[in-house]
């Protein structure tokens, strides 16, 4: 580069001097009427040929190392340039610009035909890497030759080429190499490259740099046009790739399980991607990978999915997460590759769910009592949901095809009822258990509610769920059995998100009744203190339409309670004149302190006995003992002298006697 820089500076100086000399010579010739010396074509060409071109060819054959890195010194270079300059500036018919342009091309073609082509043909039969190495050398030499030839005849590029609109000297030289060399050996070059690629596929080491430069040659020879690369290398490479992997497919299918086969497929695809990255043209990547995917994956996807002992069903059954993830990654590369896989996942999950349903049916068939509370059954659904929801999210990246398969599977078996109760009732009762439980933390309750709502979303009988849930919600909040009001709100909010505002409007109204009526209840308590009532009386106002419909049987209440009812009615009407009260006494509750507490507890116990069985001898004997103890206790309590305990105990006993054959 230093020598070239010096030559360039000297050339500019020489050109300036030459132009000055040329103008001076023209003036002197005009004054003396002398004709400048004419350089004949052959004379000038022989000088250029001998002093420059022949020397250049010899140096290329012997190697540039012996020439010190340059073809001509500055004086020799200027002499050659001057000869060309003079031949192109002579007046017609002695202006040889066109002839020199043509002979420039002829000289290059002669060298290519007589020296380069025979050398390449000789190496073609000696192996792929030998031919490509020779091609690399000859192409490098051609670029050097083109560079120097362009310098020798640079005056043509500056004037003749522009005026005549002809290809530049460099473009013409590239065209000569393509026509004289590439067109003659392009098949040998492609065969050599493909041969080395096949060796690499078989695990042999090859010179990636040699292949890379050989493939870059296609782009250079066409000056950026991909057609030679595509037509002469890419198409044959894709054909041989298809043949190679077709053979591998048959070998792997015969020897390997589905996971082992897919490991090899993934490895092959990775290697082909690296191959493109290392030396192939990036435009080949999609085409090459498509051929590989088609041959070793798409053509056998059904066989792989259903292969006995190792197919998709077996991988799901054995929790082979890594293998499932690999299968998903590979099948997602195929057009419509995931749908067959998703169908298997749906059938598998559906089968697992049906098995849970069948287990409950088997328990009923074996004599287990059927009831609307079966937490084991619901938990089995929840565990199945948790497990395979994680599989869909992790192994299949939450892909919509698998989400759909998951949903359809659960819709299928969650709506299969067994016994006398629906799955909607089981879910509601399970929620009821959760919301009554004081042992669970808020986080645990919310997490459990989230899971049950997910399961609820698959129900087709959502209205039935809502109706049952509303009745259970009413019992919890009216009987003060709910463990957390916040948890109740969380559950309703989750249902609202799933089904909309209309679905939960009545449930929200029920909670609002309790919240809004709190201040009014406090005010009424203060009002009751003014009446010196012997009982503590409280009223919960429920809005018709929000709450379930309850029957209101005719009940005769004590005078003291009637008085309290009248007081509340007056209190309420003063504040809400447009509202009408309808008393549902069956939803009320009462508690007594001291002796009355014991009496109330006994009454509850008696009701429990009635529900267990009325003909139990031991139970009646136990009750008799409790009655005697109660009598002894109450008669000893100060202030209870006005109570007829014999009457109370007699009434209680007769309640039991009414349903028995044995009289006390």
Image (spheres, helix red, strand yellow):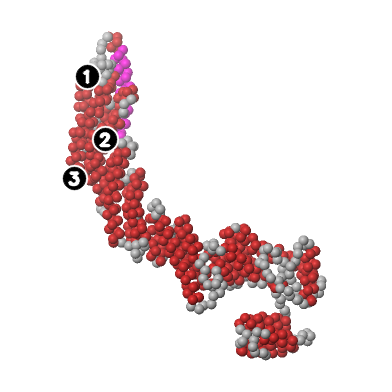
Name the residue at the front extreme: 661
Which x, y percent locates residue 358?
Answer: 47, 71
Reply yes or no: does residue 26 show up in magenta: yes
Q: Is label 1 or label 3 in front?
A: 3
Sequence-first tag of 1 and 2: 1
Instruction: Relative to 612, say whether 526 is above or below.
Output: above
The residue shown at (32%, 18%) is 20
Marking on residue 208: none
Indicate the quadrant where residue 347 lies. Answer: bottom left
Q: In front: mark 1 or mark 2?
A: 2
In percent of width and height, residue 581 lies at 75, 66
Marks 1 and 2, how far apart in space? 32 Å
Considering the whole magenta stretch, tell me its main secondary structure.
helix
Give the structural element (helix, strand or loop) at label 1.
Answer: loop
Q: Which residues are magenta?
A: 1-27
| Residue 531, magenta (yes or no) | no
* On screen, residue 634 above or below 491: below
> Could you give the CA–CA distance between mark 1 and mark 3, rounded to whole angstroms?
47 Å
Residue found 40% across the figure and 61% down from its top: 324
């Amino acid at each position: 580069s230093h020598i070239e820089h010096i030559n360039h500076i000297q050339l500019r100086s020489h050109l300036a001097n030459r132009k000055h000399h040329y103008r001076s010579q023209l003036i002197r010739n005009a004054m003396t009427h002398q004709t400048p010396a004419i350089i004949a074509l052959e004379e000038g060409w022989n000088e250029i040929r001998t002093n420059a071109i022949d020397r250049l060819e010899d140096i290329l054959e012997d190697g540039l190392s012996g020439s010190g890195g340059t073809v001509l010194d500055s004086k020799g270079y200027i002499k050659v340039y001057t000869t060309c300059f003079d031949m192109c500036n002579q007046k017609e018919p002695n202006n040889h610009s066109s002839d020199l342009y043509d002979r420039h091309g002829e000289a290059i073609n002669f060298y290519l035909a007589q020296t380069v082509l025979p050398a390449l043909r000789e190496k073609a039969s000696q192996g792929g890497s030998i031919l490509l190495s020779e091609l690399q050398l000859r192409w490098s030499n051609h670029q050097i030759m083109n560079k120097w030839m362009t310098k020798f005849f640079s005056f043509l590029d500056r004037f003749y080429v522009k005026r005549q609109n002809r290809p530049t000297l460099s473009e013409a030289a590239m065209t000569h190499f393509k026509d004289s060399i590439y067109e003659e050996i392009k098949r040998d070059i492609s065969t050599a490259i493909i041969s080395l690629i096949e060796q690499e596929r078989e695990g042999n080491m090859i010179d990636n740099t040699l292949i890379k430069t050989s493939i870059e040659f296609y782009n250079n020879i066409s000056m950026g046009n991909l057609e030679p690369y595509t037509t002469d290398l890419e198409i044959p490479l894709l054909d041989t790739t298809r043949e190679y992997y077709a053979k591998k497919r048959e070998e792997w299918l015969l020897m390997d399980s589905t996971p082992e086969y897919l490991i090899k497929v993934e490895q092959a695809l990775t290697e082909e991607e690296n191959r493109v990255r290392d030396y192939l043209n990036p435009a080949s990547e999609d085409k090459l990978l498509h051929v590989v995917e088609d041959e070793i994956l798409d053509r056998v996807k059904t066989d792989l999915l259903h292969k006995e002992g190792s197919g998709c069903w077996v991988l799901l059954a054995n929790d082979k997460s890594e293998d499932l993830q690999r299968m998903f990654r590979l099948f997602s590369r195929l057009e419509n590759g995931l749908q067959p896989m998703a169908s298997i996942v749906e059938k598998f999950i559906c089968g697992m769910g049906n098995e849970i349903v069948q287990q409950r049916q088997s328990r009923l068939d074996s004599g287990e009592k059927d009831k609307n509370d079966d937490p084991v059954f619901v938990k089995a659904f929840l565990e199945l949901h948790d497990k395979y929801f994680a599989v869909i999210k992790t192994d299949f990246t939450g892909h919509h095809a698998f989400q759909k398969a998951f949903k359809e599977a659960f819709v299928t078996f969650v709506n299969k009822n067994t016994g006398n109760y629906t799955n909607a009732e089981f879910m509601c009762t399970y929620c009821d258990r959760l919301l009554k439980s004081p042992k669970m933390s808020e986080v645990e309750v919310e997490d459990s509610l989230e899971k049950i709502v997910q399961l609820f979303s698959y129900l087709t009988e959502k209205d039935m769920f809502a109706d049952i849930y509303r009745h259970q919600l009413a019992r919890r909040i009216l009987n003060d059995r709910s463990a957390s009001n916040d948890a109740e709100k969380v559950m309703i909010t989750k249902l609202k998100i799933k089904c909309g505002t209309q679905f939960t409007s009545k449930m929200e109204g029920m909670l609002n009744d309790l919240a809004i009526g709190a201040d009014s209840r406090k005010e009424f308590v203060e009002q009751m203190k003014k009446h010196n009532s012997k009982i503590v009386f409280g009223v919960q106002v429920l809005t018709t339409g929000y709450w379930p419909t309850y029957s209101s049987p005719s009940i005769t209440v004590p005078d003291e309670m009637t008085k309290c009812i009248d007081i509340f009615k007056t209190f309420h009407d003063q504040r809400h004149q447009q509202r009408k009260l309808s008393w549902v006494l069956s939803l009320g509750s009462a508690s007594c302190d001291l002796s009355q507490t014991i009496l109330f507890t006994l009454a509850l116990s008696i009701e429990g006995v009635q529900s267990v069985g009325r003909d139990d001898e031991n139970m009646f004997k136990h009750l008799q003992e409790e009655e005697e103890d109660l009598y002894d206790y109450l008669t000893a309590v100060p202030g209870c002298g006005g109570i007829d305990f014999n009457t109370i105990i007699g009434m209680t006993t007769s309640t039991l006697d009414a349903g028995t054959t044995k009289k006390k």
